[in-house]
Image (cartoon, coloured by chain):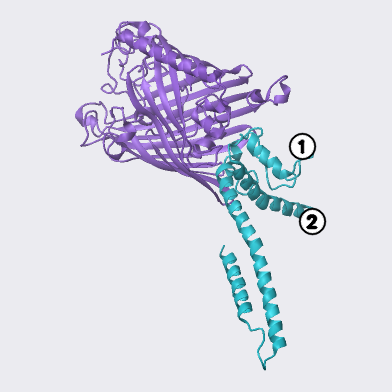
Amino acid sequence: MIGEKPRKVFFLLIIFFFLIVFELLQLLPLNTAQAVPSFKRQTGISCNQCHTVFPELTPFGRSFKLGGYVMSKTGKSYEFPPPLSGMMQASYTDAKGLTSGVAPFDSNNRETDGLNLPQQLSLFYGGRIYDKIGAFVQGTYDGVSNKIFLDMTDIRYSNNTIVWDKNLIYGITLNNSPTVQDIWNTTPAWRIPFASSSVAPTPAAGAIIDGALDQQVGGIGAYAFWNNLIYLGAAVYRTTNDGITRPLGVGTVTEQVVDGAAPYWRLALEKRWKNHFFTVGTYGMQVDIFPSGNNSGPADRFTDIAFGAQYQYMGTIEPEDIPGIDDEHKAKAGKYIITAHATWIHENQDWKASFPLGNTANPSDLLNTFRMDLNYYYRSPLGDIGGSMGYFSTTGETDSLLYSSNPVDGSRTGSPDSDGFVLEAGYRPWDMTKISIQYTIYNKFNGASSNYDGFGRNASDNNTLYVVVWQMF
Amino acid sequence: MVLMFIWLELSLVAILVFRLLPVSRAGKNIKGEYLMKRILGCVAVVLLLGVVPLLAQNFEGNEYKKGKTLYKNECQFCHGMRGDGKGPAAESLLMHPEDFTTSEFWQDDVEKKIDAEKKIEDTIKKGKEMMPAFNLESGEIIAIVLYMSNTFKKKSQSNNLGRDEK
């Protein structure tokens, strides 16, 4: 067993090694497309064409994803070397009033707990597999839980044709997290904030579709996007606990075992007006889950129905207006981006199994989640600079057994209600590097503002300062 | 391809008949036979000559098909299968993809003193504005340009004629 201190030194060395490699690659007289992530290498287009500020997608990035990640600058069905990329996240978390020795900060050393070097290390296969089949596959080492697992995975076949005189993009997706296949940032898998602390306390309640099934299910689905207007998607998911979907959950302990197949749907409408892109849509799923520790017998039923809206403005100032600008920065500079998202998820929880077992106080519960955010980024010649502010709220029925009293993560009132704000400032000095400072403010946490856990802890004690450095390579 | 073989067969049949016909026989109409032989000879030559353009056309046809496949894989997502700049991804681009069906697009670059086809080759090789430089072999680029020229240039000319008539 590696001790705490040697482990940190080991990871610091790994980070140092990657940074050295990255810097050396910058110095080598390579084609610029050789030392950057695989999507850029494959397509030959700059990161900015697909991302506002990674990982949020631009309209063209959405097209690229729908096209199955196969758009390429070569005429080859298969390319060598394979499209591999890497990512490192290093972060520091500070939560006000945090008491050492209390989970999740349980090592009696706040500094060690808060400094996550790395928080995450990922290896991606991102790009064409063969012809019209492409993939986004992420393998991750989680520096906090010290485990390696198959993270977000989306393997696609895509094609396009003309139907009723308009373009139709259609395809099939094989993935391991509901909504990971989605192209807008209103759905949970790709919502803002894109990075958050792995060690700070978070509210106890959350809808099933809101990340609870990530890497714990595998599913296959189909999608179609007609005339850049109507998007329709459907999928079915089953547990990764056993059977053919098991490889999609490698490294993840299946805590939510799904009974049978769970249907997922998605409908969205997108409309462009000049440089403004508007999207409204609905998504949801119905899933039966066995109570914790069971693999058979009765299951609880969760029905999630969600609505979302997105607005994106891809502002442009003519490059000619910027004196002395070179060709490299022409496409990049002088653009400002505004994005706004809103999502509302309504969940019906039918405790068909848990209520008879005495795990819940009510035979059924409701849970509503609402989130909205506004983001602004300016592409200056010195890099992208901007930030976001968001509001989040979770409300639901009081259930004293489901949300019971416990230090830090419990609820004195049995209510799941939480709400607050997330403020973030971000700077992207280079294509592959992003630095964010994030502050989360809680008005209410697990049902109350003061003494919410029944052990004297206030909601504001969970206010969290989070600094993260992302490096892609 | 099938047409070429039929043509070739017809040519060979004509040559065979031409060869088998007797030059002269006693008591027969030698003049008529001679005339028939001459006619068949001419038909055989014409048919054989016809094979040459067909062979060339077939070679070009292969290039055309190659160009069409490459265009479909590399270009149509933005520029559209009809070449009108309205591909599946066109709506998501901030700069509108080039419309190949306009006569303006097929105008020669007077400044650089190059024709439209060379201009397209250069654009594919070097990229332009939002379009990336493509890492294609020169044969592949020529095939794409051939396909574009045969498909969209003709379309642009008919579009132009239509406009003039109006």
The one of A363 and A324 positioned closer to us in this rendering: A324
Question: Which shade of the palette goes to chain A?
Answer: purple
Q: Badge 2 sits on which subunit? A: B
Across and down, in percent, residue A243 comes to 27, 39
Q: Is residue A211 above or below residue A203?
A: below
Identify the disc placed on residue A275: none
Res. A263 in view:
no
Residues behind callouts 2 and 1 on a single chain: yes
Q: Is residue B9 above or below residue A456?
A: below
Outermost residue, bottom side:
B27
Kindly state the secondary structure of the residue where label 2 is placed: helix
Cα–Cα span, label 2 and label 1: 32 Å
Identify the disc placed on residue B165: 2
Q: Quadrant of residue B43?
A: bottom right
- Relative horizontal placement of residue A50, taking residue A93 as reference (left or right): right
The residue that appears at 54% across and 19% down in the rendered structure is A26
In what quadrant of the picture does the N terminus of chain A appear? Answer: top left
| Residue indicated by mark 1 | B112
Q: Quadrant of residue A58?
A: top right
Q: Badge 1 sits on which subunit? A: B
The residue that appears at 59% across and 66% down in the rendered structure is B3
Q: Which chain is cyan?
A: B
Across and down, in percent, residue A201 comes to 36, 15
Amino acid identity at mark 2: Glu
Across and down, in percent, residue A371 comes to 46, 25
Amino acid identity at mark 1: Lys
Neighbour class for label 2 at 10 Å: few (<14), some, many (≥20)?
few
Across and down, in percent, residue A55 comes to 50, 26
